[in-house]
């Protein structure tokens, strides 16, 4: 191949050759090479002290040839005359190790090491030019501001020696030697080193020798296989051989000649993974040193050998990114270094961090990006380096800080080349914000605070990279064993989410990762920071529904971690109502759909979530503000949940395991979640008295019953109206637009609560269209429950004088309800008519009384009793009207129907004990008209136990006076003890008048029981007189 096209400076002109007659490079002093001249710089202070051989006491070995950045001289010939030098194999590997000189990195120049901090002060000079600003100008601005020299590869290695070409004879010998190794086995260390050094030396001829190029490319698979075998044979627990180092050096030499042994196939990728593990997973230096003392099997100083092997590994990684315009090599390196950067072992994490820092430094010096870029893990890498900056190991944190500095340089270049060319001003704004942030901190303060690193990098990361950052931080949290590092990661996470605001796109994945890892985070402060991250997403309206939906897709009852998340949400006050409202709306949407075979799982999940929120009480202000809506929503959910089990819920597949499902179905129900959420709501909103009333009257049991649910609703509504009328008034206005929404269960619960609140004085302010007219519609509903509720509502509204006229228009419908078979409907209709009876016109009154006639012999006692009561009220209502003719006609109809002629004393207004004679007249009348007087006496005795004194006193007075009209023989057959016992109990009544009336009645009853029947006495006397002689 023409030299003009292939000519490059060999990376190491002093490469070693085979141990045969191949010449080797002359060793030179390494002191002062590369970065040695800038030892006082800040970058030099961040040098890898624990990995370089500087100030390492050497073992007593001869000074040897170590590959470094120092200019190595070699004669251009390489003929037979050069073979007089000591052959490779004869010298041994130990002569190439452990000199006292400084280890350097040739491709990581420190030309700007004094400016490790970002020099962004020139940003102020970048003026906001017109939209036609050339992008090339912006590119030059970035270069000038951030000190990123666009040096060529040749310039960057100007300190390397350009060797003359090897002779054809030498090349043929090298190829022949290597082929022999392909066909044989590499058993001894000497053979292994000879093969590796021959291959390295042959790589120098690639720029100008087509035979070498053809040979190497033809045998790449064999080379990869042998290298893989060599590394596998090296033990992972010790380091007694330089074979690893020679493998790294050989790969490095070939990489600089664009022969990549670590990319392009699965075998090469496996080799990369293997050699990375072979150096990173070695025991710590202390352990290696101790092992050498116990097993002095080698002639090498383990500590010195390790340092130089590790340095060769770092140089190998750097060689991969020197020419990496698409960043695909960086992506591969990160893939293999990723697990080691997150290792729980300090020495492994430190080695990986040091290697990565050197790679980033080298890449930043030789960055020449071209599209398309194949590195799509910037967010992941930034997160890793930022977490490592907070590592408790100071040396490791320093390495990470240096790497992060160069990563910021790379990020700027990367964002420039990938930015939208039509909107390049966005990059300028990001750079200006970056400048403002960095101006607030010193460089030391900046890199020692990971959350500040996140704040700076955040302005450059896109939505996908932000997601990578968050996911990486979460992954790191579960593996970190140091509390300090966990805290740093927590700060990193919440800082990024806080400042990135609404630029995230993969929010469900982030929330899913948080929920999956929350149980693994043990540090309390970090757990709260992670939960606060969820709170930040929740408080953004853009993400609220997304986050809620994802959190609800978990098994109920929620586990300890998810329950803690709901309970400890930290949300700013303006956002609390929004979050709670959106959560409530998800439950309400389930109630608005027609009744389905199975309940939606989200309804149960929201109910449990509301319970946890109420228990945590972090959204207290919003809970008070939305109390009416929350209460009604939960009551409706209770109605929907009655009689259901978890098998009646549409549970998403895979949510529960096969082992969990049977126990969940048998132990929990949707109803228990709804009840506990309602209880928590009342308790957290200080409705303690209402809570007590519900417990005292078994209200929760009533709510949970299919037939008694509306009774429970009525009990709670009445308790709220009695103890907290202000909230009750809010609820009544809230319910007005909701009464005709949702399915039947939704409407029934809402109607039940609404009707009870009509007892409030506020009800009279409601327009007729929202009160009487709505109740009129329910009277015609096919469901008897709605008709019962309508009648209850009318019974409450009829007390308001202004509404009576509207209600009187419904009298025909109400009268028709007297013929219903449902006892509740009939009784409620009678109660309404009792309140309207004095205002009913004669025609309607006559129709009503005719209907009541048929109810007098009804088998239902209450219907019979109240119908007679209404009939009497109807008579009284006519008596006190001015329509005399109408009154006479009604009284005539009543007397004809009853066939009685009632004494006028029946209508006495005063108490009976004032006029005992009138009571006697009444008792005498009934004594003559009625049969079964003992039963009448027994019924009257029931009123003697009434709690109201007037009723109790009148009943006892009636018993005493009515007893003398009872058939004495029948009374004695049943005995008077049951009457006497009740009357004796009344002798201890606290009311004196009651005791007097009771004693009088008792005396009369005892007299009746002791004396014979007067008629029997008369007959005996008559018979006796008939027997006497005249």
Image: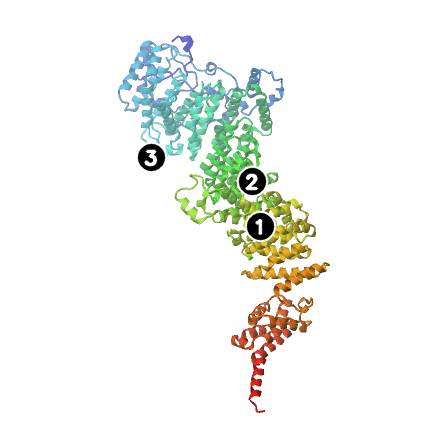
Judge whether residue 759 can be spotted in this image. Answer: no
User: Where is residue 169 drawn, in percent x and y?
Assistant: 31, 10
Judging by the rendered image, the residue that carries numbered circle 1 is 787
Q: Earlier in the sequence, mark 3 or mark 1?
A: 3
Judging by the rendered image, the residue that carries numbered circle 2 is 585
Q: Earlier in the sequence, mark 3 or mark 2?
A: 3
Q: Earlier in the sequence, mark 2 or mark 1?
A: 2
Q: Nearer the viewer, residue 361 or 771?
A: 771
Mark nearer the viewer, 2 or 1: 1
- Label 3 and label 2: CA atoms lie apart by 72 Å
Q: Quadrant of residue 744?
A: top right
- Disc number placed over residue 649 in the picture, else none: none
> Dot 1: within a 10 Å radius of its alpha carbon, few (fewer than 14), some, or many (20 or more) residues?
many
User: Where is residue 697 drawn, in percent x and y?
Assistant: 55, 57
The secondary structure type at the circle numbered 1 is helix
Residues at circles 3 and 2 in contact by the CB criterion of under 8 Å: no
Judging by the rendered image, the residue that carries numbered circle 3 is 294
């Amino acid at each position: 191949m023409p030299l003009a096209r292939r000519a490059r400076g060999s990376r190491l002109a002093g490469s070693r050759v085979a141990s045969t007659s191949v010449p080797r490079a002359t060793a030179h002093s390494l002191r002062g090479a590369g970065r040695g001249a800038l030892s006082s710089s800040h970058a030099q202070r961040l040098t890898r002290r624990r990995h370089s051989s500087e100030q390492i006491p050497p073992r007593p070995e001869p000074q040897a040839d170590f590959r470094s950045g120092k200019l190595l001289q070699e004669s251009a010939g390489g003929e037979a005359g050069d073979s007089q030098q000591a052959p490779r194999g004869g010298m041994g590997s130990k002569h190439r190790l452990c000199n006292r000189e400084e280890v350097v990195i040739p491709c990581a120049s420190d030309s700007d090491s004094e400016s490790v901090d970002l020099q962004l002060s020139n940003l102020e000079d970048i003026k906001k030019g017109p939209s036609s600003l050339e992008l090339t100008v912006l590119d030059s601005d970035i270069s000038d501001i951030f000190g990123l020299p666009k040096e060529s590869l040749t310039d960057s290695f100007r300190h390397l020696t350009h060797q003359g070409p090897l002779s054809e004879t030498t090349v043929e010998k090298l190829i022949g030697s290597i082929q022999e190794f392909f066909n044989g086995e590499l058993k001894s260390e000497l053979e292994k080193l000879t093969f590796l050094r021959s291959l390295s030396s042959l790589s120098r001829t690639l720029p100008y020798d087509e035979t070498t190029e053809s040979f190497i490319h033809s045998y790449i698979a064999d080379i990869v296989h042998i290298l893989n075998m060599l590394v596998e044979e090296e033990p992972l627990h010790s380091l007694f051989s330089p074979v690893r180092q020679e493998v790294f050096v050989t790969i490095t030499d070939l990489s600089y000649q664009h022969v990549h042994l670590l990319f392009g196939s699965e075998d090469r990728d496996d080799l990369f993974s293997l050699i990375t593990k072979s150096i990173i997973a070695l025991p710590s230096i202390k352990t290696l040193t101790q092992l050498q003392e116990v097993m002095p099997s080698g002639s090498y100083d383990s500590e010195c050998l390790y340092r130089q092997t590790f340095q060769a590994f770092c140089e190998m990684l750097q060689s991969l990114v020197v020419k990496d315009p698409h960043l695909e090599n960086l992506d591969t390196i990160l893939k293999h270094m990723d697990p080691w950067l997150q290792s729980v072992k300090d020495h492994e994490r430190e080695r990986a961090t040091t290697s990565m820092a050197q790679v980033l430094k080298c890449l930043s010096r030789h960055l020449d990006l071209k599209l398309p870029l194949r590195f799509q893990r910037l967010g992941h890498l930034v997160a890793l380096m930022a977490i490592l900056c907070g590592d408790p190991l100071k040396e490791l944190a320093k390495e990470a800080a240096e790497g992060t500095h160069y990563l910021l340089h790379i990020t700027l270049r990367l964002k420039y080349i990938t930015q939208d060319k039509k909107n390049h001003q966005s990059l300028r704004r990001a750079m200006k914000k970056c400048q403002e942030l960095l101006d607030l901190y010193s460089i030391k303060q900046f890199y020692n605070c990971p959350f500040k690193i996140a704040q700076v990098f955040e302005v450059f990361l896109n939505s996908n990279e932000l997601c990578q950052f968050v996911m990486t931080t979460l992954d790191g949290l579960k593996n970190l064993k140091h509390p300090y590092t966990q805290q740093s990661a927590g700060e990193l996470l919440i800082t990024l989410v806080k400042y990135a605001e609404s630029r995230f796109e993969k929010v469900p994945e982030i929330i899913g990762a948080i929920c999956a890892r929350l149980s693994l985070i043990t540090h309390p402060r970090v757990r709260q920071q992670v939960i606060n991250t969820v709170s930040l997403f929740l408080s953004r309206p853009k993400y609220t529904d997304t986050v809620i939906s994802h959190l609800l897709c978990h098994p109920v009852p929620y586990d300890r971690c998810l329950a803690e998340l709901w309970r400890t949400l930290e949300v700013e006050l303006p956002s609390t109502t929004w979050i709670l409202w959106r959560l409530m709306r998800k439950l309400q949407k389930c109630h608005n759909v027609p009744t389905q075979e199975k309940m939606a799982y989200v309804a149960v999940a929201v109910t449990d979530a509301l319970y946890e929120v109420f228990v945590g009480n972090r959204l207290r202000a919003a809970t008070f503000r939305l109390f009416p809506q929350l209460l009604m929503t939960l009551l409706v959910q209770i109605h929907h949940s009655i009689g259901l089990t978890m098998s009646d819920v549409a549970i998403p597949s895979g949510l529960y395991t096969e082992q969990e499902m049977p126990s969940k179905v048998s132990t929990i129900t949707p109803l228990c979640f709804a009840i506990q959420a309602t209880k928590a709501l009342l308790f957290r909103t200080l409705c303690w008295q209402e809570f007590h009333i519900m417990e005292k009257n078994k209200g929760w049991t009533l709510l949970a019953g299919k037939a008694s649910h509306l009774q429970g609703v009525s009990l709670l509504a009445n308790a709220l109206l009695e103890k907290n009328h202000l909230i009750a008034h809010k609820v009544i206005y809230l319910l007005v637009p909701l009464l005709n929404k949702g399915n039947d269960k939704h409407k029934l619960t809402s109607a039940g609560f609404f009707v009870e609140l009509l007892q409030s004085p506020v009800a009279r302010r409601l327009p007729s269209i929202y009160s009487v007219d709505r109740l009129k519609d329910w009277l015609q509903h096919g469901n008897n429950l709605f008709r019962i509720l309508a009648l209850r509502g009318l019974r409450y509204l009829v007390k308001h004088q202004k509404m009576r006229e509207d209600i009187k228009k419904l009298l025909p419908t109400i009268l028709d309800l007297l013929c219903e078979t449902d006892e509740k409907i009939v009784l409620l209709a009678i109660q309404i008519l009792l309140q309207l009876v004095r205002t009913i016109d004669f025609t309607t009154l006559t129709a009503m009384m005719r209907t009541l006639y048929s109810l007098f012999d009804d088998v239902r006692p209450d219907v019979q009793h109240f119908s007679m009561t209404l009939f009497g009220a109807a008579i009284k209502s006519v008596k006190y009207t001015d329509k005399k003719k109408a009154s006479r006609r009604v009284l005539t109809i009543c007397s004809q129907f009853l066939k009685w002629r009632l004494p006028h004393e029946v209508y006495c207004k005063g108490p009976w004990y004032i006029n005992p004679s009138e009571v006697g007249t009444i008792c005498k009348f009934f004594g003559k008209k009625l049969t079964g007087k003992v039963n009448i006496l027994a019924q009257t005795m029931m009123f003697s136990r009434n709690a109201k004194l007037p009723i109790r006193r009148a009943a006892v007075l009636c018993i005493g006076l009515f007893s003398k009209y009872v058939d004495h023989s029948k009374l004695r057959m049943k005995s008077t003890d049951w009457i006497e016992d009740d009357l004796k109990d009344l002798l201890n009544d606290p009311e004196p008048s009651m005791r007097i009336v009771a004693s009088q009645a008792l005396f009369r009853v005892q007299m009746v029981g002791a004396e014979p029947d007067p008629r029997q006495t008369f007959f005996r006397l008559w018979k006796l007189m008939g027997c006497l002689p005249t």
